[in-house]
Image (cartoon, helix red, strand yellow):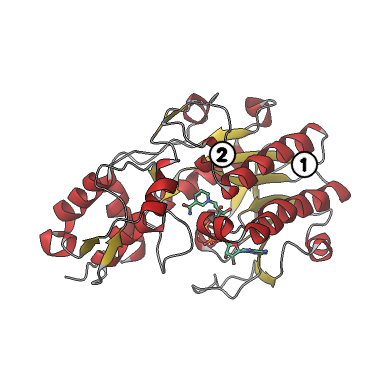
Amino acid sequence: MKVVITGGTGMLGRRLALRLLANSELIGHSGDKERIDRLILVDAYEPVEPTPADPRVEIIKADICDPKVLDKIIDDNVDSIFHFAAVVSGGAEEDFNLGYNVNLDGTRNLFESCKKVNATPRVIFTSSLAVYGGFRDIVDDTPLLPQSSYGAQKAIGEIMLNDYTRKGFLDGRSLRLPTIVVRPGKPNRAASGFASSILREPLQGSKAICPVSPETRMLILSPRRAVQAFIDVHNAESDHLGFRRGVMMNGISPSIGEMVFALKDIAGSKIADRIIWKPDSEIQRMVDSWPWFANGIIGRELGFEPDESIEEVVQSFIEDELDGNILV
Ligand SMILES: NC(=O)c1ccc[n+]([C@@H]2O[C@H](COP(=O)([O-])OP(=O)(O)OC[C@H]3O[C@@H](n4cnc5c(N)ncnc54)[C@H](O)[C@@H]3O)[C@@H](O)[C@H]2O)c1
């Protein structure tokens, strides 16, 4: 199989690539598991983390805003595409044009490249719970009423994916993700970045700023569970999705106070005391426009499993990213 990941050297793209290389297979056109022979990671920027060293991997530095580049990568042999390249929430809110160029036009470029080839690749589009806007509780049928440019761009991307699928140009599936916590590495421009910082930085010996109140709730999912959900949605039978190609990924909804409590429980008060509380009304406003509780039945029926607890989220970060070591 030839598999492409756009944004492939980013946080989720890289982790998915490593998991695909370890598993070596995905469900192919035959409906059975097929071997992955080529894994192409497309990204516009230099990788922040080491890229996978594997003969099946090819890294292509390319901007998805350039349709000609995508036309060269997406050929008749492409079986699966995971579309992760995006300007994330804070970035898309700050730079309106860049957000629409990458998140909307870049996505359309990719779908157009799929339309031109003699193949019907499975395309996994990474959407976000930001498509729902200000609803506190969300279910599968909650209307998409985004309250940010990023959420609007993701909602439009989902609708385009449905239409390109309906026309038979691709076999699309969108996964609406909650905020990924704990995000490893350095903070990115996502408005939700603090939710990872308040766990990641203290565990690695640094201070972190928390800009929202302890009562604020966030819907979260660990990178480990997110990567598994991408593989699950890719491998799901097309008929199970029907005309609704977007699936909501449930998360857990700890309050920020509960997250800090879990950190204290696992790592001790000295580490939890590294959090500095500094309210920021703009971040609080954005976070308050995101849903708090998700109860999607379709994802559950398809077998997508969120983390069981905030403790599991913290532990999986310590195991996967810190090799079990906390800096006291
Ligand atoms: N991390 C989260 O909490 C979260 C939640 C919901 C949805 N998502 C979505 O998941 C996807 C992956 O997120 P992530 O956390 O890995 O983000 P990330 O920022 O780590 O990765 C995105 C990658 O896209 C690349 N990119 C940006 N513009 C590009 C362009 N024009 N052409 C090619 N590459 C470009 C970046 O260099 C980066 O490597 C994104 O689409 C994001 O919107 C993430």
Q: Quadrant of residue 270?
A: bottom left
- Specify the amino acid type for callout 2: Pro
Q: Residues within 10 Å of mark 2 (few under 14, many from 20)?
A: many
Direction from residue 243 to residue 177 in the image, left or right: left
Q: How far from the left and from the top, in percent, is residue 121?
A: 75, 46
User: In the drawing, what numbered circle is on residue 71?
Assistant: none
Direction from residue 294 to residue 149 in the image, left or right: right
Report the residue marked by disc 2: 146
Disc 2/disc 1 C-alpha distance (Å):
25 Å
Q: How far from the left and from the top, in percent, is residue 173?
A: 65, 39
Residue at image position (64%, 31%) is 237
Residue at image position (56%, 39%) is 146
Count of numbered badges drawn on the protein: 2
Q: Quadrant of ligand 1?
A: bottom right
Residue placed most toward the observer, 33 or 242: 242
Question: In the structure shown, which secondary structural element does the residue marked by tag 1 occupy?
Answer: loop
- Specify the amino acid type for callout 1: Leu
Direction from residue 31 to residue 224 in the image, left or right: left
Residue at image position (74%, 54%) is 105
Residue at image position (21%, 52%) is 260
Looking at the image, the residue that sits furthest to the front is: 281
Q: How far from the left and from the top, in percent, is residue 167?
A: 83, 34
Report the residue marked by disc 1: 170
Q: Is residue 185 above or below residue 83?
A: below
